[in-house]
Image: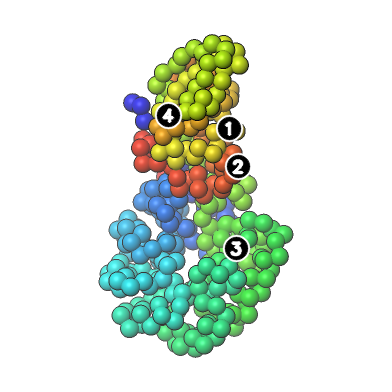
Amino acid sequence: MSTAFLTVDLDAITANWRALDAMTAGETAAVVKADAYGLGAAKVARSLARAGARHFFVAVAEEGAALRDTLGSGPAIYVFSGHMPGDADMIGDMHLTPMINSLEQMIRHVESLPGHPFGIQLDSGMNRLGMEPGEWAALRDIALAQDPRLIMSHLACADEPDHAMNPQQLATFREMTDGLDVPRSLANTGGILLDAAYHFDLARPGIGLYGGRPFAEARAVVTLDIPVIQCRDLAPGETVGYANGFTAPRETRIATVAAGYADGILRAMGPKTSLWAEDIPCPIAGRISMDLICVDITDLGHDPKSLQLLGPHQSIDTLADHADTIGYEILTSLGARYTRRYIGG
């Protein structure tokens, strides 16, 4: 086979969830939006449900409907985007809980699905989704009379523990919600790690489940092994790839592997990234192209059958640093052509 193997360790995901759950006094949900950060929401969510997760968050109602088919009737499924036009049947039939973001959404929800569960999303300073303090003050009594299941907000800078935005948002969230008899949620992964003051009744880790920063103690979740298609020798001065991106400084052995930017291996990571053969790094030679990457295996001393991009020597955050991005983008960019293997769970 010429397709790369992406291995997802479901036991590592559940171990990360349990570790984060142990840090909080309240309950711990799981964020499985964007197909569980690209790793397969059906398998990931089933494993987390077996581990004890009873609350799940998705981005849009369509994700929630697919997740309901996977999990059955038990767990609560919250929709960050709230109640959008055309969502009423899906929200009602699939027993989803929209996180209402505005007066417009509140009117739409109570008119189309009277008595159906919902939550409230407040904007505590991120200016992305949710009701701002003035809108919430005007709507609060009406909303509370409809019996919301959860009130939440989202931290903008939780991965920077000393950032002034964190206590500022905590104070704003408290001002908007203290004294209300409704469960509250503020902490994402970074919020869990900040301080117990951010935990409230329900924490909602996302990236920490999948092995990414800022949860430094997280178990690695993914490995990516890419088969070698061909190896060749270069004389000093010969070049490799588009725009002659690599010039051989010596007698050089090059392996061409079967993956590229169409598989989510970002071109920007090329100059700083190696692939690994056991414990030996083999640097990328030249540009990453759509389906192929050339790798300098001279120091390896033999022709490997495959090389590893993600694994014990190189994490999603390492690749993110090489591409000047974040681990979230590395995970969610992983392409559909990989042969996916799931272990554990």
According to the picture, the residue beneath numbered tag 4 turns out to be 292
Residue visible at 54% across and 11% down? 235
| Disc 2 packing (10 Å; few <14; some 14–19; many ≥20) | some
Q: CA distance from mark 4 to mark 1?
A: 15 Å
Quadrant in which the C terminus appears: top left
Q: Amino acid at mark 3?
A: Ala
Of circles 2 and 4, the one toward us is 4
Question: Percent from the top left, x then y, of residue 132?
Answer: 55, 78
Quadrant in which the N terminus appears: top left
In this rendering, would 322 be left or right of 55?
right
Scheme of image coloration = rainbow
Q: Which comes before the other along the chain, label 1 or label 3?
A: 3
User: Are discs 4 and 1 less than 8 Å apart at CB?
Assistant: no
Q: CA distance from mark 4 to mark 3?
A: 37 Å
According to the picture, the residue beneath numbered tag 2 turns out to be 321
Question: Percent from the top left, x then y, of residue 278?
Answer: 54, 24
User: Are discs 2 and 4 less than 8 Å apart at CB?
Assistant: no
Q: Amino acid at mark 4?
A: Leu
According to the picture, the residue beneath numbered tag 1 turns out to be 271
Residue visible at 60% across and 71% down? 125
| Disc 3 packing (10 Å; few <14; some 14–19; many ≥20) | some
Question: Percent from the top left, x then y, of residue 45?
Answer: 40, 53
Residue visible at 54% across and 63% down? 203
Question: Percent from the top left, x then y, of residue 55?
Answer: 44, 63
Q: Which comes before the other along the chain, label 4 or label 1?
A: 1
Q: Which comes before the other along the chain, label 4 or label 3?
A: 3
According to the picture, the residue beneath numbered tag 3 turns out to be 156
Q: At numbered mark 2, what does the secondary structure look like: helix, strand or loop?
A: helix
